[in-house]
Structures are given as C-alpha cells and as structure tokens.
Amino acid sequence: MALTEIPHVSENDLMAECIDNCLAAAQACEWCADECLGDSEMEECARLCRDVADMTTLHARFMARNSNYSQQLATACADACEDCAEECERHDAEHCQVCAEVLRDCAETCREMAS
C-alpha cells in the first residue's frame, strides 16, 4: 500500500493506486517468471515478466520521489505491461492468467498517469 505520509502521493489517489498496481505487477511477474523457468515454450513469457518487474518497481520508485521522468516512464511501463499481459494470456497456467490480470490493471493506471 502506497505510503500516505508522502504528501504528493497522499494528495493524488491515482498516483497511490498506480504505485500499488506497479508493486503488485512486479510481484506477479516475479512469480510468473520463476514458474516459467525451465520450460522452453515459456521463455518469452519469463523474459517479458522480468522486464516488467524491473520497470514497474522503477516506476513506483520514480512516483514516490516525484521524479520529473515519471510521466515518460509511465508510458513505457504501460506498453510493457500490455505486451506482457498478451503473452501471459497465451498460456493456460494459473500464474500466467493471474499475472495477465494484474498487468491489465497496472497498464490502465500507468496510462492514466502518463496523460
């Protein structure tokens, strides 16, 4: 849960939601990537998940520090989340389906932060 003690976060419900969604996406992606390891058919899924986990945690950190680059990163983060969700949706595994759902929420709030 986003820290309500940070003034610029507590005054911006969308930012708090985006931080929470980014951190949830990172967790889901780390789980999904770990589950995909060792399966040659899941290599692209694992790669995308690892990229998204890094991007979403970076974006959450940028929002927490009120970075001037947060808006640009929000766009890239939304794009990566959407690409990864599409890949995850191709697989029947529970971890992929859960990850895709979490990523869709993250992409939506990142797009809103970018605009």
Image (spheres, rainbow, N blue to C red):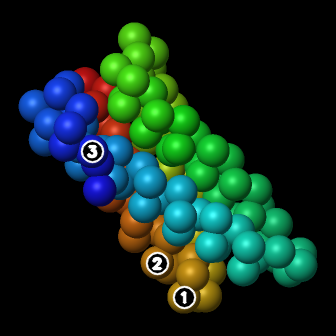
The reply to whether residue 88 is in sight is: yes
Image location (x, y in percent) of residue 71: 37, 21
* Comes first in the chain, label 3 or label 1: 3
Residue at the spot 44% in from the left edge and 27% down from the top edge: 62
The reply to whether residue 90 is in sight is: no
* Comes first in the chain, label 3 or label 2: 3
Q: Which residue is mark 2?
A: 98
Question: Which mark, by number, is residue 94?
Answer: 1
Identify residue type, mark 1.
Glu
| Residue lying at the far top of the rendered structure | 68
**Callout 2 secondary element:** helix
Image location (x, y in percent) of residue 14: 18, 40
**Callout 1 secondary element:** helix
Residue at the spot 72% in from the left edge and 80% down from the top edge: 35
In 3D space, how far apart are the residues under numbered discs 3 and 2 (Cα atoms)?
25 Å
Residue at the spot 37% in from the left edge and 30% down from the top edge: 63
Q: Which residue is mark 3?
A: 3
Q: Quadrant of the N terminus?
A: bottom left
In 3D space, how far apart are the residues under numbered discs 2 and 1 (Cα atoms)?
6 Å
